[in-house]
Amino acid sequence: MAVYNSPMGRPRTVSDTAVLEASFRVIARLGPTQFTLADIAAESGLAPATLIQRFGSKRGLLLTMARDAAQGADWCFAKVRAEHRSPLRALLASFDEMAMLATSPEVLANNLAFLQMDLADPEFRQWALVNSRATLAGFQALLDDAIKAKELRRCDTKGLARLLQAAAHGSMIAWGFSQEGAVETWMRRDIELALAPYRLARPRRSAARYNP
């Protein structure tokens, strides 16, 4: 666990990163409007007064979470790249990471409630926009690499990245209505369909060379 130094020089026994992780777990269960700092304190092992000292208020904590999520997009893409040699497989894995926002219909509903804040509140929207742009850039970079690796045909990767982002968001919502199977499977099917026209056919291995 990382240890941060407080202004008084005393080490923090629970890092800000751990507090934010606890906050994401609580909000996934309760939503961004129903939780209290006492809920976060219980989850993180800190006193509510300590949370106020660090983040100022419930709103301050939520804004810190929004900023952390936006700045974490690059980390997500670095993770899938490290786990997959194929750029295309890494791209598909990035949507599996996105599916974690909908591990259950309740979690999806609570994350959509956070999205309402992103759309209505300018301070939250600025971080949502940073997140969206970073995600699009991550998708495009993987698409460009998949073309170089001859996994996909040449195309407008900027436009395709935008299409895939829209498809993923829509697919997640559609799964929330149907609730059929795992959300990862549901989203993967839709993303595969969107990518199908751009895939390059794999060369077939012939059993013997043909001689006329």
Image (spheres, rainbow, N blue to C red):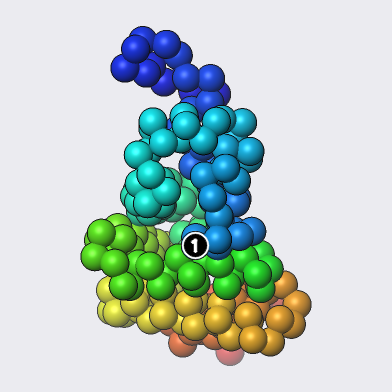
Q: Residue furthest right?
A: 181
Residue marked by disc 1:
33
Tell me what residue is drawn at x 61 percent, y 31 percent.
45
* Nearer-the-camera pick, 44 or 66: 44
Residue 178 horizontal side relative to residue 131, left or right: right
* Nearer-the-camera pick, 65 or 189: 65
Vertical placement of 189 versus 49: above or below? below
Vertical placement of 72 versus 8: above or below? below
Vertical placement of 37 versus 77: above or below? above
Which amino acid lies under the numbered mark 1 shown in the image of this protein? Thr
Count of numbered tags:
1
| Residue 155: % across, % down | 31, 79
Tell me what residue is drawn at x 66 percent, y 64 percent.
103
Q: Is residue 129 visible?
A: no
Q: Is residue 28 visible?
A: yes
Tell me what residue is drawn at x 55 percent, y 30 percent.
47
| Residue 118: % across, % down | 35, 67
| Residue 188: % across, % down | 60, 74
**Quarter holding residue 35:** bottom right
